[in-house]
Image (cartoon, rainbow, N blue to C red):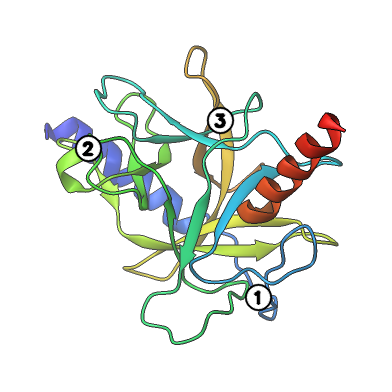
Amino acid sequence: MNPLLSLTLSFFLFTFITNLPSNTAAPSQVLDIHGNPLIHGNQYFIFPASDNPTTGGLTLNKISDSECPLTVLQNNANQGLPVKFTIPESTTDNILTGTDLEIEFTEKPNCAASSKWLVFVDNTTQLNCVGIGGPENYHGVETISGKFLIVKHGSGGIYRLGFCLDSTGDCDLIGLQSFEGEGGSRLILSTFGAYSLVFVNAASLKSAAAAAQISDMR
């Protein structure tokens, strides 16, 4: 990596670390839109908080000069891909706010080493973006080691996602940033404009779709 880029990234990460909001709320059970607890290993869609959250899910696409669709995007036009949550080194299935989590899609492109979420610094925009894959997918690109978490926001089953650095434990929230031609809004680490979202159990959504299809046939 050239010295100028290295200096830029170092300054950018310093800014990220020193402008993080604190999360002092007491941990609580994370719930889906039907009021059911989120369960470790189950599949969920992540939708924007709205009156009818069935679209606007998360997808993957290529950005910059990437040859593989590794960047996580929020796309208002479709249902997106389901995710599952894993609590590292835990014996409980209950997911609480503020708990360190691994998040991964249940599907991935063949070119990606893993479907697990990570954070990388996009060399073009200098944004901390959410993506998937492993180190072999990010040659010449800075990746940030840390864990994701869920943060309660407002009333009902509305939440936000956050990311905490392994090195210091400092955390930031996840927001959205749109760029023309990318097919959606990137999930980025952001001190301002965090993304408000809900969780929908993938099995219940499929059951509802099947019931609606049967009803239409009658």
* Residue at 72% over, 67% down: 31
The residue that disc 1 covers is 24
Q: Earlier in the sequence, mark 1 or mark 2?
A: 1
Q: Residue furthest front?
A: 218
Kindly identify the amino acid type of the residue bearing the numbered disc 2.
Val
The residue that disc 3 covers is 177
Instruction: Report, in whole angstroms, how far the alpha carbon at label 1 lies from the one at label 3.
Output: 26 Å
Q: Quadrant of residue 11?
A: top left
Q: Residues within 10 Å of mark 3 (few under 14, many from 20)?
A: some
Q: Nearer the viewer, residue 57 or 49?
A: 57
The residue that disc 2 covers is 141
Kindly identify the amino acid type of the residue bearing the numbered disc 1.
Thr
Q: Residue furthest left?
A: 2
**Could you tell me if the residues under marks 1 and 2 are in contact, i.e. CB atoms within 8 Å?**
no
Q: x, y (%) of residue 150?
A: 59, 63
Kindly identify the amino acid type of the residue bearing the numbered disc 3.
Gln
Left or right of residue 103: residue 157: right
* Residue at 76% over, 46% down: 208
Instruction: Report, in whole angstroms, how far the alpha carbon at label 3 lies from the one at label 2.
Output: 19 Å
Q: Residues within 10 Å of mark 1 (few under 14, many from 20)?
A: few
